[in-house]
Image (tube, helix red, strand yellow):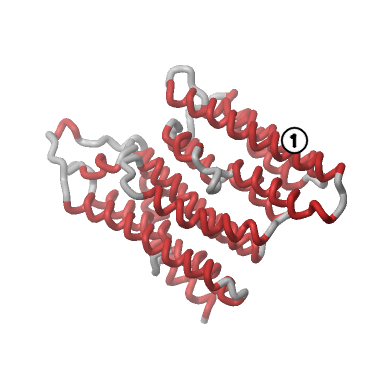
Amino acid sequence: MLFMVNSNKMFFMFILFFSTLISISSNSWLGCWIGLEINLLSFIPLISNSNNLLNSEASLKYFLTQTIASINFLFSILLKLIFLKNFFEDFFSIMINSSLLMKMGSAPFHFWFPNITEGLSWFNCFILMTWQKISPMILLSYYLNMNFIMIIMIFNSIIGVIGSFNQNSIRKLLAFSSINNLAWMLASISISNSIWNLFFIIYSLLNMIMCSIFYIINIFYINQMYNFNLNFFIKFSIMINFLSLGGLPPFLGFFSKWIVINFLINNNWLLINFFFIMMSLIMIFVYIRIIYSSFLFFNFKMKWFKIHIKNKYFHFINFFSFISLIGMIFSTFFFI
């Protein structure tokens, strides 16, 4: 799934991972901002491609939005250093939270996120939906404004569902699914960092499986899943991981959401819990509608249109799909 061996790309990948460590291990807001800037400047060469206009457009949009968020973040830090009185504390926290939410593509600052994913490769989509959320999310946990974050959680859960309807692009569908799951991540990091770690690891695993499958079979749009020559087991793997991503029991994706639901009930966040569960049910309905169509409606083609599997990694995808299928059986042991 990785790009071809290229020393420049490998160098920027190393800087990308290293910049995240700089941000989350810094002991000052200015150091965090420097780490975010290095992260931005290392990710743009990875997504830019002079031979592809969509990639160039995506890299320009990403640069502009991240620059605006970084300016807002730096401005908030400087204001906080000047005005140290508690009277402005809520204002500073909302400004810092807003800039970090914009960096990770959260609603209502989400408009750039699905458009940029449309112009990226599957590997870059995976990086954008997972790794690029680590630094802003951890920095957000340092300075949370809970009243503001609760509103953002509800926004994310609703907008992620509304945007998923009538989507033909799988990359945009996964982007809106990421916005919906971001609400769960914000809830988990508001409760405990360890719960967020578990949720993020499971979410990243499911995203990795989905992006790997779609990369291997070279599919970008939902109507390509209706191809008659597509292997039944491939469709079955896609079904398992779609339902797991939506949080349907007994799949692995439900395990992390189950833990968040329990902690939300214990902390009396009943309204947000209700919103989360209802929006997850609608997301599962969207996924089931796609899966139902891909299983029952076929686009007949001649044999020479048969989809060619790109590489030999599909056995690993089958293994991870099996883990996703039986994961909930093992996860129930933690609650016995």
| Residue 96 in picture, x, y percent from top left | 71, 46
Q: Is 173 placed left or right of 108 in the picture?
A: left
Quadrant of the image occupied by residue 240: bottom left
Front position in the image: 108 or 219:
108
Q: What is the residue that sits farthest to the top in this orientation?
A: 50
Rendered residue at 87%/49% (across/down): 84
107 to 303, vertically: above or below: below
| Residue 258 in picture, x, y percent from top left | 50, 70
Mark 1 lies on residue: 34
Q: What is the residue that sits farthest to the front in this orientation?
A: 87
Number of residue marks: 1
Kind of residue sitting beneath label 1: Ile
34 to 87, vertically: above or below: above
Front position in the image: 142 or 77:
77
52 to 225, vertically: above or below: above
Res 1 visible: no
Q: What is the residue that sits farthest to the bottom in this orientation?
A: 336
Quadrant of the image occupied by residue 100: top right
Q: Secondary structure at mark 1?
A: helix
Question: Badge 1 local density, few (<14 within 10 Å), some, or many (20+)?
Answer: some
Q: Is 223 placed left or right of 116 in the picture?
A: left
Q: Is 31 placed left or right of 334 in the picture?
A: right
| Residue 135 in picture, x, y percent from top left | 66, 45
Res 220 visible: yes
Front position in the image: 123 or 142:
142
Q: The N terminus lies in which quarter of the figure? A: top left
158 to 123, vertically: above or below: below
Front position in the image: 216 or 74:
74
Rendered residue at 61%/47% (across/down): 101
Rendered residue at 87%/52% (across/down): 85
| Residue 58 in picture, x, y percent from top left | 49, 29
